[in-house]
Image (spheres, rainbow, N blue to C red):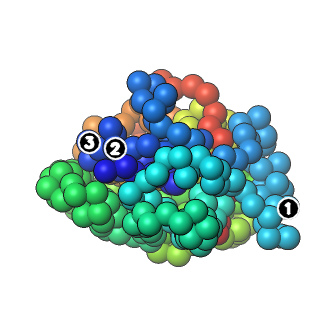
Amino acid sequence: MRIASLLPAATDIVYALGLGDDLVAATFECTVPASSRDKVAIIVGGLDTSTMSPGEIDAYVRGQSAPGGDLYTLHEGALRAAAPDLVLTQDLCRVCAIDQGRVDDALRHLGCAAEVVTLDPHTLDGVLESIAAVGRSAAADTAAARLVRQLRDRLSSVEESVRGLARPRVAVIEWIEPVFGAGHWIPDMVEAAGGRPVACHPHARSAPTSWDAVGSERPEVVIVAPCGFDLAGAADQASAVARHLPGAEVWAIDADALVVRPGPRVVDGVEAIAGILHPQATAGRPDAVQRVQPSTSARTDAGTSMPVLKSGAGAGAPYEA
């Protein structure tokens, strides 16, 4: 089977299912192993925002979106040459990836009869269901069922570890200029990690808010997870967040790897968040988080600052459709 992934999370799923040899096309934002890059065509391009500030990226996104402009370019010639049997796409967020409508139009124009699977999870459980959906369409049902079972077992282990512990109030910030509270599956991740999500939009699109509004929710812990940024980029932005919310513990997390991509690694994200909230009960993921500001709140169980083991900012855009 020949698979084209138009969504970084879908590419993560493909590799997690052991289908990397079937991947023939991906986007410029997908994580493709170096050993496979010469055989995977890049069929979706976009602006490199790695040198832009969050405010500059927001201005660019709004400028492109207002007149109905495009944030991503679908290279139809490359898509035709890839000749996929299966195309993985999304309708969840036109800021984060190319949408299904444009893919359908392109396939009709090219006369391509590929099956199109749209992945639009709004919940943590929906993320796991997306993995199963890819497995069904790629004739990898057994591998998908095994992977989902393993991920659910890990979530159950975290749930058992934090059972009965106090649940701190947690705000996850997906963007800082302007500030966006977390949406879709991310509040579920906080719940699964033993926290109480606040200043958020469970199972719905993230939306701009204000620092006063976030502060009014009295978060004890603030996790900075800017869409499209790794740990180093999140840590840079978390310093500004700490100034806006001085009464809370502020942490940065590798958002691009563990939070904002709805694929298998969101479970790593749950484990990382659990390690922030309940370090006495869970091992967490110290390589993926960094404490930015000493606590000035009543919480005393968050542990000490964890080391940064990654470097380099990612490229992304605010998580709003």
Instruction: Tell me residue 14's x, y (percent).
Output: 35, 48
Q: At label 2, which amino acid type do we have?
A: Asp
Residue at numbered disc 3? 18
Determine the residue positioned at 39% across, 33% down. Answer: 286
The nearer-to-camera label among 3 and 1 is 3
The image quadrant where one finds the C terminus is bottom right
Q: CA distance from mark 3 to mark 1?
A: 39 Å
- Tell me the SS state at disc 3: loop
Q: At label 3, which amino acid type do we have?
A: Gly
Residue at numbered disc 1? 63
- Tell me the SS state at disc 2: helix
Viewer-nearest residue: 30 or 180: 30
Lateral position of residue 94 relative to residue 65, left or right: left
Instruction: Tell me residue 122's x, y (percent).
Output: 44, 71
The reply to whether residue 57 is visible in this rendering is: yes
- Tell me the SS state at disc 1: helix
Determine the residue positioned at 42% across, 63% down. Answer: 114
Asked whether the beta carbons under mark 3 and mark 1 sit within 8 Å of each other, the answer is no
Q: Which numbered disc flags the more N-terminal residue, 1 or 2? A: 2
Q: At label 1, which amino acid type do we have?
A: Gly
Determine the residue positioned at 76% across, 35% down. Answer: 51
Lateral position of residue 268 relative to residue 237, left or right: left
Q: Which numbered disc flags the more N-terminal residue, 3 or 1? A: 3
Q: CA distance from mark 1 to mark 2?
A: 37 Å
Q: Which mark is residue 22?
A: 2
Q: CA distance from mark 2 to mark 3?
A: 9 Å
The nearer-to-camera label among 2 and 3 is 2
Lateral position of residue 61 relative to residue 226, left or right: right
Local crowd size for mark 2, using a 10 Å CA cut-off: few (<14), some (14–19), many (≥20): some
Instruction: Tell me residue 28's x, y (percent).
Output: 59, 41
The reply to whether residue 216 is visible in this rendering is: no
Determine the residue positioned at 82% across, 54% down. Answer: 60
